[in-house]
Amino acid sequence: QVQLVESGGGLVQAGGSLRLSCAASGRAFTGYPMGWFRQAPGKEREFVAATNRVGSVSDYADSVKGRFTIFRDDAENTVYLEMNSLKHEDTALYFCAALNRGNYYKDYARISVYDYWGQGTQVTVSS
């Protein structure tokens, strides 16, 4: 079992930046690929970014490529999402998750392979 707690959300103007953190506890954090997802009001949860077990590979949704960066610090049991050039459409509740099933390289964007989720942190971008 892995417990995940997100932080770092807030209100920011369009064009601004935020860094989200996801602190893990419980089972060995280093055993899991990690992902970030988001859910806007009235919309389905969607994939944002993911990284493999060792942080050597990262994948991104097209909508955030070039603006967001995911990285992990295994010594701190934390995965981060650096968000730059934020847009109003980035407004959502952001969740981190640990991938516990499937194969990262095929399944990193699939919600169903992530078994452990945090409670979310709200990001609001004013236009």
Image (tube, grey):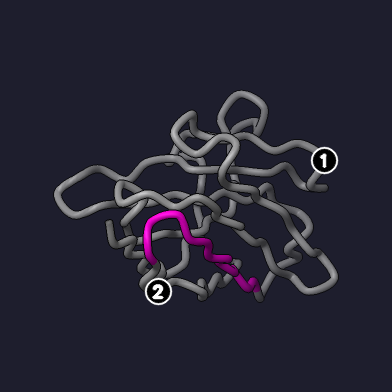
What is the number of callouts on the image?
Answer: 2
Asked whether 113 or 6 is in front, the reply is: 6
Q: Residue furthest top?
A: 106
Quadrant in the rendering for residue 91? bottom left
Give whichever of discs 1 and 2 has the lower sequence position. Answer: 2
Asked whether 10 or 31 is in front, the reply is: 10
For residue 41, the mark is none
Label 2 CA crowd tier, 10 Å (few <14, some 14–19, many 20+)? some
| Bounds of the magenta segment | 13-24
User: Residue 95, image x and y in percent?
Assistant: 44, 59
Up/down of 101 relative to 124, above or below: above
Residue wearing tag 2? 10
Amino acid type at image mark 2: Gly
User: Residue 2, image x and y in percent?
Assistant: 60, 67
Amino acid type at image mark 1: Ser
Residue wearing tag 1? 56
- Calculate the distance from the C-alpha at mark 1 to the C-alpha at mark 2: 29 Å
Q: Secondary structure at mark 2?
A: strand
Q: Is residue 42 left or right of residue 14?
A: left
User: Residue 114, image x and y in percent?
Assistant: 51, 47
Quadrant the N terminus occupies: bottom right
> Is residue 16 highlighted in magenta?
yes
Residue at image point 78% right, 74% down: 76
User: Residue 69, image x and y in percent?
Assistant: 64, 48
Considering the whole magenta stretch, tell me its main secondary structure.
strand
> Is residue 7 highlighted in magenta?
no
Q: Secondary structure at mark 1?
A: loop
